[in-house]
Amino acid sequence: MGSTEHAKPGEGKRIDYPPKGSAAYSDQKPKQMCGGIAGFPCPEGMKCVDDPSDNCDPTKGDADCAGMCVK
């Protein structure tokens, strides 16, 4: 029979997006995530920088901090 264990709160990965109308949505384009442990790349002509809107700070030892693509 299958397991009777249920997922515990906090076991999933939560992704928060900035509120609509914030600076991250200038030109009607949502910010694009990059970096992190997976090393998601940015489109050509853009670079990955730390996302200041999250509480993850790679300069303070935080791991798996997602960044955002900027021109």
Image (cartoon, rainbow, N blue to C red):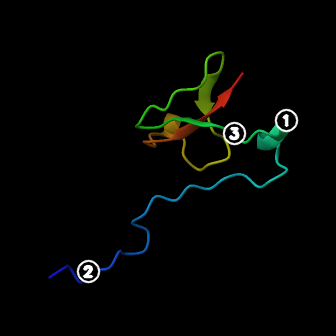
- The Cα–Cα distance between marks 3 and 1, rounded to whole angstroms, is 10 Å
Give coordinates of residue 27: x percent, y percent: 85, 35
Give the crowd class for mark 2: few <14, some 14-19, many >=20 residues within 10 Å.
few
Instruction: Tell me the element at label 1.
Output: helix
Task: Point out which mark residue 38 bears.
Answer: none
Task: Point out which mark residue 27 bears.
Answer: 1
Give the residue type that dot 3 points to.
Answer: Lys
What residue sits 62% from the left and 56% below the top? Answer: 16
Give the residue type that dot 1 points to.
Answer: Asp
* Residue furthest top as drawn: 45
What residue sits 19% from the left and 79% below the top? Answer: 2
Question: Residue 4 vs residue 37: left or right?
Answer: left
Vertical side of 7 occupied by 49: above or below: above
Give the crowd class for mark 3: few <14, some 14-19, many >=20 residues within 10 Å.
some
Q: Nearer the viewer, residue 57 or 51?
A: 51
Vertical side of 26 occupied by 3: above or below: below
- Answer whether labels 3 and 1 touch (C-beta < 8 Å): no
Task: Point out which mark residue 31 bears.
Answer: 3
Instruction: Tell me the element at label 3.
Output: loop
Question: Residue 32 vs residue 57: left or right?
Answer: right
Q: Which residue is mark 2?
A: 5
